[in-house]
Image (cartoon, grey):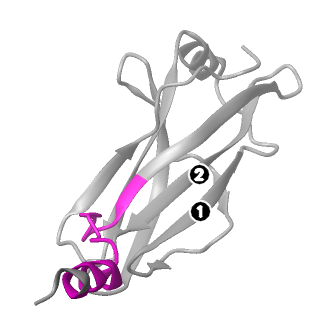
Amino acid sequence: MSKRLLVALLFSAGCIDTDAAVFVDATIGAAGLTVVPQGGLGFGMQGSFALELHLGARASGTSQVTYTSFSLKASDGTVVVESLPVAVDKPSPVAVEPGSDVLVTFTVDTGAATLDPAIKDKICAGQVQIVGVIEDSLESESSPLESPPFAAAGC
């Protein structure tokens, strides 16, 4: 085989895909919460976070990603709010095609409901994390997720 033909074959083959994500790689990012007063009797929360879903091109097929609830964890590891009240821009399950990324945005809002002032103290005592669990139809186990720690505003 001539050297020119070998070089041409190598370039025509394209780049080798090294993305090893054969299951959905999920992260929680862009997390932020603000503590808001609710008529002197308590407080509420408003904020948002993003669920970033990635599936590599080598995956065996489309994944259906399911999420049910997200919680708020204090810096000491205790769960402060068991189930965050969220609205989501894409309902569960979300289809993630091989070689693609999907961004799901969650909005947190307690609305008119008030939370106990003791919860505010725990939130404002340090950094918090949004935690949750997803299920990937290509994988047999649930995957726990945690956002990077962040400080809530309005404290």
Single out the residue that lies furthest toward the left: 1
For the residues bearing labels 1 and 2, Cβ distance under 8 angstroms:
yes
In which image quadrant can residue 40 be found?
top right
**Mark 2 surroundings: few (<14), some (14-19) or many (≥20) residues within 10 A:** some
Q: In the rendered view, would you say 63 is above or below 121?
A: below
Q: Secondary structure at mark 1?
A: strand
Q: In the rendered view, would you say 148 is above or below 64?
A: above
* Residue 127 placement, left or right of 33: left
Q: Secondary structure at mark 2?
A: strand
Q: Quadrant of the C terminus?
A: top right
Q: Quadrant of the N terminus?
A: bottom left
Residue marked by disc 2: 50
Residue type indicated by callout 1: Val
Q: What percent of the width, then of the height, locates residue 141?
A: 19, 65
Q: What percent of the width, then of the height, locates residue 129?
A: 48, 31
Residue marked by disc 1: 104
Stretch of the chain drawn in magenta:
5-26
* Disc number placed over residue 78 in the picture, else none: none
Q: What percent of the width, then of the height, locates residue 88?
A: 65, 63
**Mark 1 surroundings: few (<14), some (14-19) or many (≥20) residues within 10 A:** some
Q: Residue at x 30, y 84 (%)?
A: 8
Single out the residue that lies furthest toward the right: 39
Q: Residue at x 33, y 77 (%)?
A: 57
Q: Front-most of 126 and 149?
A: 149
Q: Front-most of 144 and 69?
A: 144
Q: Disc 1 versus disc 2: distance between alpha carbons?
A: 6 Å
